[in-house]
Amino acid sequence: MYRETNTRSIAKGVSWRVVATTTTIIIVYFFFGRLDLAIAAGMIETVLKVGLYWAHERAWFKVHWGRKKIEPFNLWFTGLPLSGKTTIADKVYTELEKLDIPLERIDSKDIRDLIPGIGYTRDDRNRHMHRIGNLIRTLQRNSISTVASFVSPYKESRKAIREMVDNNVIVYVKTSVETCKERDYKGKYAKAIAGELQNFPGVNDVYEEPQHAEIVIDTETMSADEAADLIVKYIKKHHVK
């Protein structure tokens, strides 16, 4: 989260005093008709009240009453390859950034680029999910929320993520294999069908549908923008009030 620095408090005090001092000078001059007296009164008031404003701001900073901490959350997007997870997650991240909360975007491709050679067997994927869980947990300890998108095809790895992190929200991007094949601009499904790619969820490996997802998005009936709007409203209602 953010804190008010001394420099910012002083800058706010000075900007306010410019307005307030000008008003004081005008009022004194209006009643007494003396510009020298009006300017002197304005200067004395400025020096005194800038200091008082700073002290007032710092005192309120130490008072916790009326402030509510936003507990970090994790939005976990799961679904078949090419289901639309990344597209929707990117849109959600862009909208949540506008709320001015500490937030990070984590996508499977970016992580695999950083840690090459992870592997795609069930054991490889489950170990990888534990790494991601530890990363998210570390970010949450620093009050940073996350928007993460991973195929995460196995129920045990998604369960591990839920147990490892706080305020986990599973978003199941539900799409049929046939629709994913139609969107396959990378040709991955074709390679998997041809046997060139192994352990590919939806073709030669399983994708175990989440049974307890907080949000289910059917991309065959809902656009990416509509899905993003629905998810952002959920976060605003349950986690950012």
Image: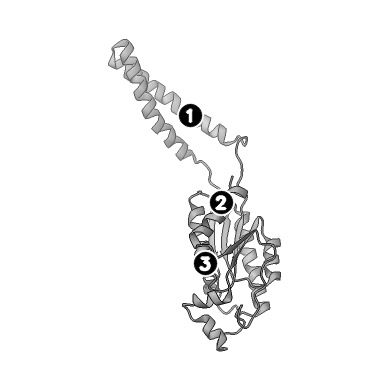
Name the residue furthest front: 221
Residue 226 vertical position relative to residue 17 in the rendered view, above or below = below
Mark 2 surroundings: few (<14), some (14-19) or many (≥20) residues within 10 A: few
Counting residues from the start of the chain, the first of labels 1 and 2 encountered is 1
Mark 2 is on which residue type? Lys
Mark 1 surroundings: few (<14), some (14-19) or many (≥20) residues within 10 A: some
Residue 97 vertical position relative to residue 49 in the rendered view, above or below = below
Do the residues bearing badges 1 and 3 touch, measured as CB atoms within 8 Å? no
Identified at 63% across, 55% down, the residue is 141
For the residues labelled 1 and 3, the Cα–Cα distance comes to: 47 Å
> What numbered label is drawn on residue 233?
2
Residue 2 vertical position relative to residue 94 in the rendered view, above or below = above
Snapshot colouring: one colour
For the residues labelled 3 and 2, the Cα–Cα distance comes to: 19 Å
Do the residues bearing badges 1 and 2 touch, measured as CB atoms within 8 Å? no
Identified at 43% across, 35% down, the residue is 12
> What numbered label is drawn on residue 86?
3
The quadrant where residue 200 appears: bottom right
The residue closer to the viewer here, 154 or 46, is 154
> What numbered label is drawn on residue 53?
1
Do the residues bearing badges 3 and 2 touch, measured as CB atoms within 8 Å? no
The residue closer to the viewer here, 31 or 109, is 109
Mark 1 is on which residue type? Tyr
x then y, percent, for residue 119: 61, 80
SS for tag 1?
helix
